Amino acid sequence: MSESDLDVRHAEKMRKKKEARDKILATKTIEKGLLIVHTGKGKGKSTAAFGMVMRAVGHGMKVAVVQFIKGRIETGEKAVLDRFADQVTVKRMGEGFTWETQDRQRDIAAARAAWDAAKEMIASGTYKMVLLDELNIVLRYDYLPLEEVVAFLRDEKPEDVHVIVTGRNAKDELIEIADLVTEMTMVKHPFRSGVKPQAGIEF
Amino acid sequence: MSESDLDVRHAEKMRKKKEARDKILATKTIEKGLLIVHTGKGKGKSTAAFGMVMRAVGHGMKVAVVQFIKGRIETGEKAVLDRFADQVTVKRMGEGFTWETQDRQRDIAAARAAWDAAKEMIASGTYKMVLLDELNIVLRYDYLPLEEVVAFLRDEKPEDVHVIVTGRNAKDELIEIADLVTEMTMVKHPFRSGVKPQAGIEF
């Protein structure tokens, strides 16, 4: 086929695609706060959530971030969030769960404190988006009652607030009530070839 | 089992996990610029890349962003990137590929211009990270010769520069030479229940 035939065929194909897409979008009229879950063993769960937080900040929204796991270095994110301190509130769960502490009772107490803070911020009317970073891990270790978390997110989250939950091994009950669930799958990882965690990539 | 038995068992389990993890990390000593690919049909490909860009910015790095597809509203990202104009250079591919234009020859020319700019920025020594946003789409439509792109990223990317490529349908040849590949899989999408694209979520 000649280049100009290709061009014509392409234009027609794209016109049809756009038509189909516009038609679908026209049926999407509901605006509401979503419950979003990023799970899976791959990378990008917290990073994509951080990207959503930054995008929301760019839209002038107020955002809250609750970090349920401490211990990973995240100086890059912190430096950026600090620049938007007027819009972003960050709660770090004290000396909570880390690979370093291994004190279950203290972790349970810290998870409870973080969850109480999270509930308050979600319900406050102040924030348009709340990120519950690594909440899935806390639920996996049974540091918080799953039923309580699911019931709150299902019944008490205000209609206009977006909540993002990250962490591998998301509970089925959470996926069940979520609006948007993405699984990050690892296809290839640099650790396999001896590459160490690096600034801007892992933290 | 009593709570205190659980605590003891947990501490021991965590100690072993940490030991194993430290052991693995100790073998990871190579520091190098990675070729990273985010692909798959799920959400979060560009958003996670944007998160990485912002994290790198937080580390004080200079970052370049080349957007190979225009047409989606991304005012939130733009507003944030503008705040860091001293560290981030953004190239948008003119009136390039969009659902609106459907002009194949113009799209090919725009893809070429964007790729030339990308190569220059990757090779410049100025940027520690370069995001090639939606390059996979351009490659899928054969707007750029795959061999040329693969050869450049494999042989001419400076050792210390991270390059991130996003877009669904990543070519096998690209995955083959990449260091880190993550596939975003859609588990559940709000469009299914009639929810429209919203600020902070889709754009």
Image (tube, coloured by chain):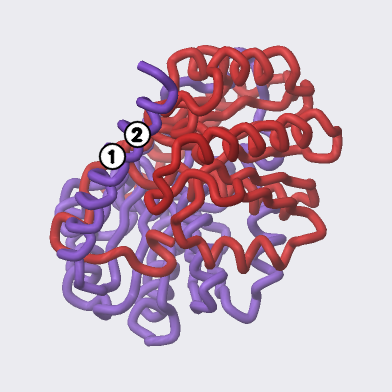
Chain colours: A red, B purple
The chain containing the residue under callout 1 comes to: B
Amino acid type at mark 1: Glu
x and y percent of residue B106 in the render?
A: 47, 58
* Same-chain status of marks 1 and 2: yes
- Residue at 60%, 46% (x, y): give it: A93
Give neighbour class at mark 2: few <14, some 14-19, many 20+ (Cα, 10 Å).
some
Percent coordinates x, y for residue A180 in the rendering: 54, 25
Residue A68 sits in quarter: top right
Q: Quadrant of the C terminus of chain B?
A: top right
* Residue that label 1 marks: B12
> Does the rendering let one see residue A133?
yes
Numbered label tally: 2
Quarter of the figure with residue A191: bottom left
Instruction: Please state which of residues B75 and B51 is positioned toward the viewer in this rendering.
Output: B51
Instruction: From this view, report whether residue B185 is shown above or below residue B175.
Output: above
Place residue A87 in its image quadrant.
Answer: bottom right
**In front of the other: B71 or A46:** A46
Query: Taking B159 as reference, is A203 left or right?
Result: right
In the image, residue B54 sits, relative to residue A104, either above or below, namely below
Q: Is residue A57 above or below residue B42?
A: below
Mark 1 and 2 residues: CB-CB less than 8 Å, in contact?
A: yes
* Chain of the residue that carries numbered disc 2 in the rendered image: B
For residue A1, say whether it is visible: no
Query: Could you tell me which residue is drawn at 62 percent across and 40 percent down?
Result: A131
Residue under label 2: B8
* Horizontal and vertical percent position of residue B83: 71, 70
